[in-house]
């Protein structure tokens, strides 16, 4: 057994550097980070404790090499480790479900800042892994939280992630006319990260080849699902309640116009993410006459 920082650690550093070089050659910008995260995954430790390991074990190198080869083929890091971070959460993900993105955390921050009544009703549309629903449920344990998606594959992950929480998982298509009339006028907060990429957009291989197309593309202009969501928000939200809908960075003005033209909303505001890109629109349901 070698000492921490001794021969074993040196071999591990060398293996990680070789892996990082391979990932960089494959065009992966986060090569060093990905190599360290995959090494930590194989070694069964956290990235920050990786270099404290004396000896990662006889099977480490072979398993690590297999993961690096897969990442070099642009298989998403999250698929290889089976999880994705979102805000305070670590969510199970894999083939068939959209991987939550850090950009959506800007929408989450807005939602967490909303003043809601006691025992609020919160709805997350096109929930995918359940990221927004679960983060909001953790913040408001008194809430009734409903997570909706129409993908059977995605809902397997939603239910797995929601196990043991108050989140209700529902299989439904948000574009269905007249969906869930029992929610009319009863929702205190609605959030949505729908498929919104315009058809034909050029995407990184991790997205184009591994995220489900059903969760990515929103028709020719990216607005096919956003339109029905605006209609649901108008019907479901209580007077004075708010909603937030994520959109493509090319369709902020169209999303604002869709809310404004509906006639049921005030305070329609476009927001940018931390990278400065147009990311989501918020709106408040006006009082019904």
Image: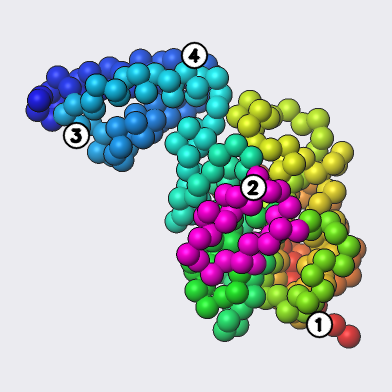
Q: Is residue 263 left or right of residue 107?
A: right
Residues under numbered marks 2 and 4 in contact, where contact means CB atoms less than 8 Å apart: no
| Residue at 68%, 62% in the rendered image | 170
Out of 276 and 225, give the one closest to the viewer. Answer: 225
- Range of residues picked out in magenta: 146-172
Q: Is residue 21 left or right of residue 112?
A: left
In percent of width and height, residue 173 lies at 79, 56
Residue corresponding to mark 3: 52
Give the mark nearer the N terminus: 2 vs 3. 3
In percent of width and height, residue 93 lies at 54, 43
In terms of secondary structure, where does tag 4 sit?
A: helix
> In the rendered image, is residue 272 in sight?
no
Q: Quadrant of the C terminus?
A: bottom right
The dot on residue 154 is: 2
In terms of secondary structure, where does tag 1 sit?
A: loop
Q: Compared to 13, does 46 lie above or below?
A: below
Q: Compared to 187, does 26 lie above or below?
A: above
Out of 22 and 282, give the one closest to the viewer. Answer: 22
Disc 1 versus disc 3: nearer the observer: 3
Residues under numbered marks 2 and 3 in contact, where contact means CB atoms less than 8 Å apart: no
Give the mark nearer the N terminus: 2 vs 1. 2
In percent of width and height, residue 255 lies at 80, 54
CA gap between label 3 and label 4 equals: 28 Å
Residue corresponding to mark 1: 287
In terms of secondary structure, where does tag 2 sit?
A: helix
Residue corresponding to mark 4: 25
Q: Compared to 262, does 34 lie above or below?
A: above
> In the rendered image, is residue 207 in sight?
yes
| Residue at 75%, 58% in the rendered image | 172
Q: Which picture quadrant has residue 181?
A: bottom right
């Amino acid at each position: 057994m070698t000492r921490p920082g001794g021969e074993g650690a040196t071999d591990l550093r060398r293996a990680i550097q070789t892996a990082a070089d391979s990932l960089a050659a494959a065009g992966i910008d986060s090569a060093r980070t990905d190599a360290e995260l995959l090494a930590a995954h194989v070694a069964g430790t956290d990235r920050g404790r990786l270099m404290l390991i004396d000896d990662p074990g006889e099977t480490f190198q072979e398993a690590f090499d297999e993961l690096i080869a897969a990442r070099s083929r642009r298989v998403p890091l999250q698929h290889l480790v089976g999880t994705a971070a979102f805000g305070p959460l670590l969510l199970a993900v894999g083939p068939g479900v959209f991987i939550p993105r850090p950009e959506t955390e800007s929408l989450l921050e807005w939602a967490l800042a909303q003043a809601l009544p006691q025992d609020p009703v919160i709805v997350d549309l096109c929930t995918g892994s359940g990221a927004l629903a679960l983060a909001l449920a953790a913040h408001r344990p008194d809430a009734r939280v409903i997570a909706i998606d129409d993908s059977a594959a995605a809902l397997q992950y939603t239910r797995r992630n929601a196990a043991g929480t108050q989140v209700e998982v529902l299989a439904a298509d948000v574009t269905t006319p007249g969906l869930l009339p029992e929610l009319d006028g009863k929702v205190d907060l609605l959030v949505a990260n729908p498929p919104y990429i315009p058809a034909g957009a050029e995407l990184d291989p991790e997205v184009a080849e591994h995220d489900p197309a059903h969760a990515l593309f929103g028709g020719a202009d990216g607005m096919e699902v956003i339109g029905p969501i605006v209609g649901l928000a108008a019907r479901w939200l209580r007077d004075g309640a708010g909603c937030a809908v994520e959109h493509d960075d090319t369709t902020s003005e169209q999303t604002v116009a869709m809310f404004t033209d509906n006639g049921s909303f005030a305070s329609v505001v476009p927001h940018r993410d931390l990278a400065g890109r147009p990311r989501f629109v918020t709106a408040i349901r006006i009082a019904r006459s």
